[in-house]
Image (cartoon, coloured by chain):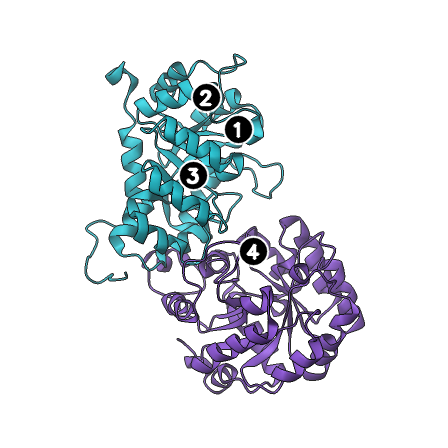
């Protein structure tokens, strides 16, 4: 698969981390998690930009955390916001279409959700309007594999076939479950954060195409060196590395259609 | 790639060309609980070449999971096919005649140490059935790599502590250093108490921050790079070490120098070590 001499990239590789986070962490030594510290970290690992959630949203209060996130990235051109979503069942969040409209109006190009930690069902009627609205606006959803189960992912991908669903933190033990899902559901993508099986990256690209994977690190809990070295020293050619490294995710972020366009 | 600021060199996609990298924790072959894309020795060699890894010390998954005699023979075959790249750990299963298995392979030049997996074999690291291993280790100077898992009833770091106390001349690699980040402090204390204990770095939860802390606390002479491949991809652990905030000398020691020194103390005669000892400056894939 390696033929790096055959195609010289027209532009330098610009890594975009699709799975990163700002903020402190209750169970890991990640420092303060300020935007400045995060950007310095990107430089150390050769990463151009990152889509970031905020631990104030993922680990404390999604409403406050999402607002804080927008403020934190407002003057950080290398950081793009990822909102943490809840179902509207208790009135904490607006109904799905309204939330998607707010996200788009705020420049949010990616949603994440934590059904395991936050206590709701990913599949089923509570989240369906949000997922349908996200699908309609091309707004992708990033979800940590540990926050859900394979049956729910399959149900969601089946019920919302236009939704871009990005699974992250898949680990090295799940390929037997994962491959069937990828075969059946073309809009399920994989983030490379902790995609750690031996030669799994090359295997998945060979089987499903580079367009099914997007680069992510899981930082700061995960060491970005894992995902950076895994991709850059892979057996993949430069075109595949560029697609995974950022091009595909940039297209997804750009494709998130402003709400006015479709509303 | 230099040892200071790896990002630029990694982005160039060129393999490592610095001091030799020696993977102290590798395996060979498939594993029943999940799919591994290509667990063959040839694929492992390809990954090593891609990354600039000079050598790996392997133990057979067949031996770890099921059958030590057949699996250790598999390891020997790989090492004989690529003697300058691979050396082996003899896997000892406490339920499959440890003394006979040690005797079978102790004179074989491919084997440079012993691998134990108390969790999978459901037998405590400090149990009587492992006694021949510790006697062998003290007698020969060859290292013992043991799986460790914080909180395990079979291979918690406290088990390593007891064994190291009873067998102070044994060189023990604490595989994964207990795995959980919350155990790394205990691993450091363990290594401080026992100069013969080395902290091995592979696992799903390690981080360059923790690696740098280990090296600061116990010195690079007690910290060794391992990957667990083809169980986990080699590049996961290697990326943490390459980007960790370590000085050049410490990084080179962790990547291979420390392990090479440990193996040299075992005088096994393995071709991999021969090559290292005779021509260390050019010991590249």
Return the chain for callout 4: B
Q: Colour of chain A?
A: cyan
Which element carries disc 2, helix, strand or loop?
A: loop
* 1 and 3 marks on the same chain: yes
Identify the element where label 3 is drawn. strand
Question: Chain B takes which shade in the image?
Answer: purple
For marks 2 and 3, the one nearer the N-term is 2
| Chain letter for mark 1 | A
Tell me which label, 2 or 1, sits earlier in the chain: 1
What residue is disc 4 on? B203
Task: Give the residue at x 34% y 37%.
Answer: A185
Residue B209, position as x, y percentages in the image: 56, 52
Give the residue at mark 2. A127
Location of residue B88 with respect to A143 vertically, above or below: below
The residue carrying mark 1 is A115
Find residue A28 and report its horizontal and vertical position in percent. 60, 42
**Looking at the image, is A222 positioned above or below residue A117?**
below
Chain letter for the residue marked with disc 2 in the picture = A
Query: Which structural element holds mark 4?
Result: loop
Q: Residue at x 52, y 37 (%)?
A: A33
């Amino acid at each position: 698969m390696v033929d790096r001499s055959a195609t010289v990239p027209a532009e330098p590789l610009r890594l975009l981390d699709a799975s990163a986070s700002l903020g402190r962490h209750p169970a890991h030594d990640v420092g303060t998690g300020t935007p400045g510290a995060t950007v310095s970290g990107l430089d150390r690992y050769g990463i151009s930009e990152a889509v970031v959630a905020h631990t104030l949203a993922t680990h404390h209060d999604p409403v406050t955390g999402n607002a804080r996130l927008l403020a934190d990235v407002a003057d950080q051109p290398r950081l793009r916001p990822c909102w943490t979503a809840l179902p509207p069942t208790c009135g904490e969040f607006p109904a799905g279409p309204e939330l998607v409209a707010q996200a788009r109006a705020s420049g949010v190009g990616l949603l994440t959700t934590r059904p395991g930690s936050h206590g709701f069902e990913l599949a089923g009627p509570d989240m369906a309007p949000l997922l349908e609205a996200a699908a309609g606006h091309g707004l992708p959803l990033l979800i940590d594999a540990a926050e859900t189960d394979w049956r729910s992912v399959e149900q969601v991908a089946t019920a919302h076939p236009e939704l871009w669903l990005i699974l992250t933190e898949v680990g090295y033990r799940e390929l037997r479950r994962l491959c069937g899902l990828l075969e059946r559901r073309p809009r399920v993508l994989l983030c490379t954060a902790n995609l750690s099986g031996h030669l799994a990256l090359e295997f998945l690209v060979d089987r499903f195409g580079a367009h099914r994977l997007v680069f992510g690190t899981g930082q700061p809990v995960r060491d970005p060196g894992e995902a950076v070295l895994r991709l850059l020293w892979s057996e993949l050619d430069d075109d595949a590395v560029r697609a995974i490294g950022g091009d595909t995710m940039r297209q997804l972020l750009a494709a998130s259609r402003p709400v006015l366009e479709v509303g | 790639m230099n040892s200071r600021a790896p990002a630029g060199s990694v982005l160039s996609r060129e393999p490592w060309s610095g001091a030799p990298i020696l993977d102290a924790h590798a395996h060979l072959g498939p594993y029943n609980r999940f799919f591994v894309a290509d667990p063959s020795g040839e694929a492992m060699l390809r990954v090593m070449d891609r990354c600039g890894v000079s050598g790996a010390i392997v133990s057979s998954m067949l031996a770890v999971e099921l059958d030590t005699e057949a699996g250790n023979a598999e390891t020997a075959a790989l090492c004989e096919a690529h003697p300058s790249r691979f050396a082996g750990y003899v896997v000892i299963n406490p339920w499959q005649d440890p003394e006979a298995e040690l005797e079978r392979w102790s004179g074989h030049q491919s084997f440079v140490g012993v691998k134990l997996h108390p969790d999978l074999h459901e037998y405590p690291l400090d149990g009587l059935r492992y006694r021949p291993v510790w006697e062998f280790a003290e007698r020969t100077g060859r290292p013992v790599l043991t799986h460790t898992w914080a909180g395990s009833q079979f291979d918690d770091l406290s088990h390593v502590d007891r064994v190291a106390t009873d067998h102070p001349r044994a060189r023990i690699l604490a595989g994964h250093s207990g795995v959980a980040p919350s155990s790394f402090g205990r691993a450091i204390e363990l290594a401080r108490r026992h100069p013969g204990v080395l902290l091995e770095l592979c696992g799903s939860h390690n981080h360059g921050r923790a690696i740098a802390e280990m090296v600061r606390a116990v010195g690079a002479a007690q910290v060794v790079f391992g990957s667990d491949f083809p169980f986990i991809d080699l590049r996961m652990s290697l990326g943490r070490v390459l980007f960790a905030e370590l000085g050049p000398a410490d990084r080179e020691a962790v990547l291979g120098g420390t392990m090479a020194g440990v193996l040299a103390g075992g005088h096994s005669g393995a071709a991999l070590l021969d090559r290292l000892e005779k021509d260390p400056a050019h010991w590249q894939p």
